[in-house]
Image (tube, rainbow, N blue to C red):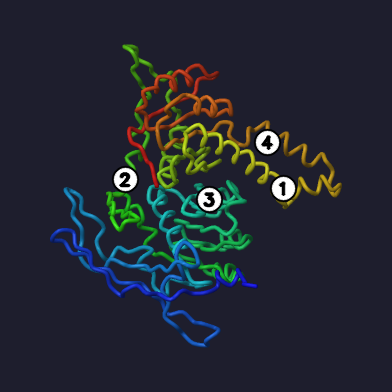
Amino acid sequence: MQDYKEIYRRILHDPFPEELTISFGGQVLRYRKRTWKIYDPEKGQWVERGLRYGENPDQEAALYELVGGNLVLGDCKFIEPGRGLVSALREEDLLQFGKHPGKINLTDVDSALNILKYLMDRPTACVMKHNNPSGVAQGTEIAEAFERAFMADRIAAFGGCVVLNRPVDRTTAELLARSYLEVVAAPEYEEGAIELLERWKNLRIIRIDRIDRLAEYADLPFVEFKALMDGGLILQRSFQNKVRSKEDLKPAVAHYQGTEYRILREPDEREAEDMIFGWAVEQGVTSNSVIFVKDRATVAIGTGEQDRVGVVEIAIFKAYTKYADQLAFKAYGIPYRQLEEEVTQGKRPREQKEEIDRKVMEDRGGLRGSVMISDGFFPFRDGVDRAIREGITAILQPGGSERDYESIEACNSASPPVAMAFTGQRCFRH
């Protein structure tokens, strides 16, 4: 019988060329394939390897770094050679290869950097899973930021990719080493941190020394490629976040049949901070999506749903589920599902589960007092009404719907009124 576990250990043959040249009219871009010298214990020697495999173990893949040329499209000058992040990783940056990186490992790191580049003002941690954040949070120290991001969705964080925008100290390393992770990336690792992380032999430990200059990339656009099944290509300029401060928020105002509808309550300072933080995270989430944020940490992230009210409901469901797990883990050191099972089996008193269930309902899954961020406008007010019932205090959305007035009315009629602001831009990500 085939050993299906073995397919995750193998390394695929790499048929890709050593160099690529792409021509945009008269502009020529040159790329070099990235490989690394890796010690193979089975062969007892150092071997040259590229990416382990693609999205699945039977898909070949390769990583290329821009080494020559630049791209100017209209009035935009894109990222130049010599500013590589993920594509420029060297052997000395891969502090522990683990099962050396595959495509998803590196695209998770890249997706996290794309979020963190807007959040460099404070220590910030981003936990990624399948190119979506499972938790993002800020703190006074990087250890606090990681703990908050991890606990936002402890279940999804299992086997995840953690990217930090500050050096890893021993305290943070101890927190990281408590759980199984695939990748940890940071600008540097302080003395003793690597030794703590090395207990996980398959963990990829990565140093990206340009993370401390990541804010410079916030205004550097790049070209995104989408290959079609017929061999065609769709190219687009990368998304750029235009909502970086409270001054960038636009008042929620709509006009319908000659009547102006205006939000009654503007966001307060805390809500505005969460809106700015949340919009930076939201542009890194697969659409359709909404996220809930409180005190510069994600509470729940709803991703990739086809309808707006559906993704609100999914995010709410996730909030309740993850919050129950968080409470059970903090109180008893076990997942909520295990607690539930042990209560059913008579191994634990029923009161333990009942107390957690009561707290989850009382706090509305941690959603009470949070801010809802939506990557697109609300075509109907149903998603807004659904979130308001959970006790949110503010909403940020692009605006532009024919029925914006209904969403404004929903916020104004809430008790107390819910604040709302518009971004004036959409941030779909597919």
CA–CA distance in space, label 1 to label 4: 14 Å
- The residue to which callout 4 is attached is 360
Q: Secondary structure at mark 1?
A: helix
CA–CA distance in space, label 1 to label 2: 40 Å
Q: Secondary structure at mark 4?
A: helix
CA–CA distance in space, label 2 to label 4: 37 Å
Give whichever of discs 2 and 4 has the lower sequence position. 2
- The residue to which callout 2 is attached is 240
Q: Amino acid at mark 3?
A: Ala
Judge whether 121 appears above or below 309 on screen: below
- The residue to which callout 1 is attached is 337
Kindly report which numbered mark, 1 or 3, lies closer to the viewer in this rendering. Answer: 1
Query: For the image shown, how many numbered marks are present on the structure?
Result: 4
Q: List x then y, in percent, for residue 356.
A: 73, 39
Q: Is residue 265 left or right of residue 356?
A: left
Give whichever of discs 2 and 3 has the lower sequence position. 3
Q: Amino acid at mark 1?
A: Arg
Give whichever of discs 1 and 2 has the lower sequence position. 2
Q: Residue at x 20, y 58 (%)?
A: 71
Kindly report which numbered mark, 2 or 3, lies closer to the viewer in this rendering. Answer: 2
Q: List x then y, in percent, for residue 343.
A: 81, 45
Q: Residue at x 24, y 61 (%)?
A: 80
Mark 3 Cα within 10 Å, few/some/many (few <14, many 20+)?
many
Q: Amino acid at mark 4?
A: Val
CA–CA distance in space, label 4 to label 3: 23 Å
- The residue to which callout 3 is attached is 145
In this view, the residue in front, 192 or 45, is 45
